[in-house]
Amino acid sequence: MKIDEIIQKMNQENFNSLIILKPENIAYVTGFKPSSISVLILKEEPLLLSSKLDLEEAHQKSHLPVEEFKSLDKLKKSLKESNPGKMGVEHSMTVGIYQKFCGDFQVELTDLIEQFRAIKSADEAKKIKGAIRIAENSFENLDFSVTEDNLAAQLEYNMRSAGSPSPSFETIVASGSRSSLPHATTTSRKVGSPVMIDWGALYQNYASDITRTIIHSEEQEEIFSIVLEAQKKAIETIKPGVKASYIDKVARNVIEEYGYGDNFIHSTGHGVGLEVHEKPSLSVRSDEKLRKGMVVTVEPGIYLEGKFGVRIEDMVLIKNRAKVLTSHPRKIIA
Amino acid sequence: MKIDEIIQKMNQENFNSLIILKPENIAYVTGFKPSSISVLILKEEPLLLSSKLDLEEAHQKSHLPVEEFKSLDKLKKSLKESNPGKMGVEHSMTVGIYQKFCGDFQVELTDLIEQFRAIKSADEAKKIKGAIRIAENSFENLDFSVTEDNLAAQLEYNMRSAGSPSPSFETIVASGSRSSLPHATTTSRKVGSPVMIDWGALYQNYASDITRTIIHSEEQEEIFSIVLEAQKKAIETIKPGVKASYIDKVARNVIEEYGYGDNFIHSTGHGVGLEVHEKPSLSVRSDEKLRKGMVVTVEPGIYLEGKFGVRIEDMVLIKNRAKVLTSHPRKIIA
């Protein structure tokens, strides 16, 4: 049982309790993802406190006991009475809540739950594959002779109809010279060339994240080949035990060799699970090692300011080597 | 100029600088809403630090000077050298960043920017009206003989095509007995009766938020009339100077008189602007007073667990009285 492993790890790190507020962490431990403030107290007898708004649904879905959340003051009072010892709180807790809540306790920041989340169980991998299938199926039969806004609308309509409650992040449709903006939002202009589409779905709270760049000219194809080579080398290098930063280095080296080092302006990838960006980070600054069960994106890109950009992003599950989970063809010429 | 007023207010409160990380606050001050980490330093000579990912767009859109954000460590070092005096930081800053960043400074939490944001300028009100028009136009000509998922997909397709980069929050389509869950997500079941739809769009970063409940039976109509009466009384009571908590009380009193006090399980409304939930809160615990220029929702509801629920939500701009901005008919019988 997941909860037993978490409690065991807490004991090893001398935490008497954990106070969990991040919805994705609560979803990981309880199976219920709250829509408004909820507090999960992890200790020998764990308890989820949910706001009235969520209470009925929390009772239906949570594996752990649920009670109504009244206020931070009341929670603080009852925690004090129970003598909570060393309490762990999340890095993502806001300093507003931290200052109000934590003054009287012995508190330490911890990413204990995020560490568990980095390694996916078979069941979690299945949900991620579900999110990939929804995203990939939604990419079929799109009408490209429209505006960027409308192309994104079609894609999101397909994902929503297939049960994804929202895109896993704001869909990027960046075409023509705007494809050189890695995080461009869509515009009301007609889709130009090349067109970079970065999109993902949610399935049972788990995310997917894919990018395809549809190319047209020879110049675009040349850049595309470099990005593809960088992606392939990075994927081939992935295995348990390798440093996450090394994967970034491998992809970056390929792009640097062709003289485009300054045009690869983001990291090579990131973990995906209950959040679309989570541990590990495949970046130069990462100090993590890859481990079996991690799911990461591999997404090198080259951005030529004022001209165009190309990014290719796939998702892999780390087993003995990288197993590519995404299946949509990378090279699309239109 | 907004920035001058902010600097003046900072001086009054003895802040030598403000460190702003919240994307909506950065959007408010600079006109540019970042998609990845950015830090706005407000002082006599304000500066926006944007990550490489956003840099090109930040240069295009920000009213304030932009430089590249390198790392928190570098920022900390340069701030130290400039002797920043009393620094204000947001309540929403994560404790992870707070502990890493703030140790060596004289720091105080402040909601100074949020206070400015609560009062909308004419230009902001116009953008909010734009977000309302997109949401309302998108509600026309929907096909209801589908699943909840698909009904939400239609609505969101229409908003996305009209330029809303995402819904302003996850669209709620809760029908049949699920309408008694105020924050229900959608399901793959066919739309039943009644159907509660809570949706909103974004326009130039500003949000809208509307709820309609389409009723069918006499029992539903009876509950609907009570909710409508509560909403009308609350709206009539709104004017500058009145306590926000009093508006909640007025709506709650009506519902209590009919014996449904325990079934109105959320607050009466909230401010809407760059965020879909912002100051002021129309709730029993609020200590704010209504002021000219605020934009709030008024959204009482009655939730009969296991049976059905009704909520009616409109948006008003506070002038000498409440000016209702939403125009879609409240009563829809199907």
Image: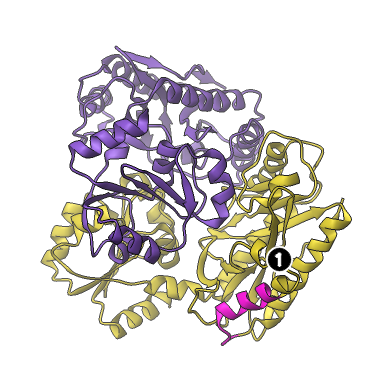
Chain colours: A yellow, B purple
Residue occupying image coordinates x 37% and y 20%: B317
Horizontal side of residue A223 vs A100, given as left or right: right
Question: Is B19 rendered above or below residue B200?
Answer: below
Q: Which residue is drawn at 82% across and 56% down?
A: A220
The percent position of residue A100, horizontal first and vertical second, equals 19, 54
Q: Quadrant of residue A239?
A: bottom right
Tally of numbered tags: 1
Under circle 1, the secondary element is loop
Residue A308 as seen in the image, left or right of residue A171: right
Parent chain of label 1: A
Membership of A252 in magenta stretch: yes
B135 magenta-colored: no
Look at mark 1 in the image and give the residue it sits on. Answer: A260
- For badge 1, the amino acid type reads Tyr
Q: In front: B62, or A40?
A: B62
Q: Looking at the image, can residue A322 be seen? A: yes
Residues in magenta, as a range: A240-253
